[in-house]
Image (cartoon, helix red, strand yellow):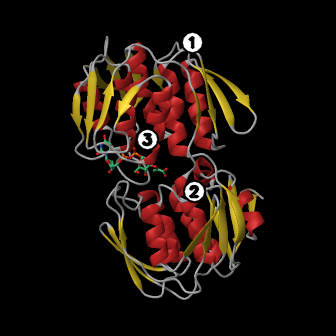
Amino acid sequence: MDKIRIKGGIPLKGKVVLSGAKNAALPIMSAALLTDGWSTLSNLPTLRDIQTEKKLLSFLGASFEEKPEATLRINSSKIDRFEAPYDLVKTMRASILVLGPLVARFGRAKVSLPGGCAIGARPINLHLSGLELMGARIDLKHGYVEAKAKKLKGAEIVFDIPTHTGTENLMMAACLAKGKTIIGNAAKEPEVVDLANFLTAMGANIEGAGTDIITIQGVAHLHPADYRIMPDRIEAATYMVAAGITGGEITLDGYDGSCLETVVVKLREAGLEFSQKKKDLTVHGPRKIKSVSLTTQPYPGFPTDMQAQFMALMSLGQETSVIKETIFENRFMHVSELRRMGANIQVSGNQAVVKGVSRLLGAPVMATDLRASASLVLAGLAADGITEISRVYHLDRGYEGLEKKLLPLGARIERIKESA
Ligand code: EPU
């Protein structure tokens, strides 16, 4: 297993090209199951999760053609299995996104129950009750969920909580259902909108994606489509924090900061400055980081996927910040590792009180999940001395070529084999 070694303390400077968004690419690849023929997806990030998704789709019978420049063609004409097996689902929860498309097109699906993970229990009850309302029969047996329906029918669904992948699963299912589906209290994340745009390009009839209420009028067939995946806003925000925490200056190539309004407001409060030149956004790190409090919220609130990285920044704040996590019940696994680097953070329930320290010290630390790993990289970039982060496979799930992108910015970062 690889480790990442960072010698910190260097202000990062330069330009970064963002990759396509993982959390848009995964549902969009699953949506290719809804039709015959070749769909072409461009700006697909090179990530472990994308490899896992490909494995899953090819297990189901899909075929692929790799094209240059992050482009992949997918053909789902010969789907002959309807099951997402345990081995794949346990490595990537987003495998659940094949459930809606499979039931909608083939009338059946069997998907391993994802179970809990490093950030929380993460049930899928809302995906399942939505499908039941659409007429699917749901059975939970031997760790699997089995869904069957001759033909899904439109339904009125109101989520208790706005679930991101739940909204995506039901939106995909509703595209081929008979009649109209209304999803109330829907997730408004930009990746949901990206998926809706792809589905629309496939011939779906969807209104309201990006708002609380999404209305889908089912159609008899969808057709393949060509689509460019949106840029990864969480990757963008992570590089913004990298500029802030190192007191550097990073330009996000061709990115205008869209979909990150709340994060930018908080980073500005922390002292970061932003300047836009044509299509490039430059982030200027402050000399001193101001402490800022925040609460994670569904979009357009502050994203839970940036909480750990922001906490790394706040660990060097001048005063005290209070960070409240309201989306996942166990998303503070990075705290104990940041503390090993000298951060002063106390957790009580879903709240972390971060008293800024004047410096962090490099240490060996362990990555526990994707965004926690990113926060440790950021802390390592700012810390005095050497930080070694193990279990970096978490990072590889969601950040394309992180050290390759950081090196030209001046970071002293290398990947080493754990056995070396
Ligand atoms: N929830 C339920 N029942 C459900 C579904 C969700 O109670 O049936 C709860 C969850 O336990 C959680 C809340 O609702 O407390 C919100 O969870 P949501 O369903 O929105 O999360 P998700 O769809 O499983 C996606 C992203 C996550 C991101 C969250 C929140 C993908 C593939 N994953 O997860 O991304 O943190 O939305 O924005 O899109 C990551 O990229 O690191 C990551 C974890």
Q: Image quadrant of residue 96? A: top left
Q: Is residue 142 visible?
A: no
Q: Amino acid at mark 3?
A: Val
The residues tagged by marks 1 and 2 sit, at their Cα atoms, a distance apart of 35 Å
Q: Amino acid at mark 2?
A: Glu
* Residue that badge 1 annotates: 78
Pinpoint residue 71: horizontal percent, then vertical percent: 68, 34
Pinpoint residue 380: horizontal percent, then vertical percent: 63, 72
Dot 1 or dot 2, earlier in sequence: 1
Give the residue at x 69% y 62%. 4
In the image shown, does 336 or 221 lie closer to the viewer? 221
- Whether residues under marks 1 and 2 lie with C-beta atoms below 8 angstroms apart, the answer is no
* Residue that badge 2 annotates: 235
Q: Residue 216: which disc?
A: none
Mark 2 close to ligand 1, CB under 8 Å: no
Furthest toward the front, the residue is 278
Q: Residue 193: which disc?
A: 3
Dot 3 or dot 2, earlier in sequence: 3
The residues tagged by marks 3 and 2 sit, at their Cα atoms, a distance apart of 18 Å
Give the residue at x 38% y 46%. 116
Give the residue at x 55% y 39%. 25
Helix, strand or loop at mark 1? loop
Q: Image quadrant of residue 171? A: top left
Counting labels gives 3
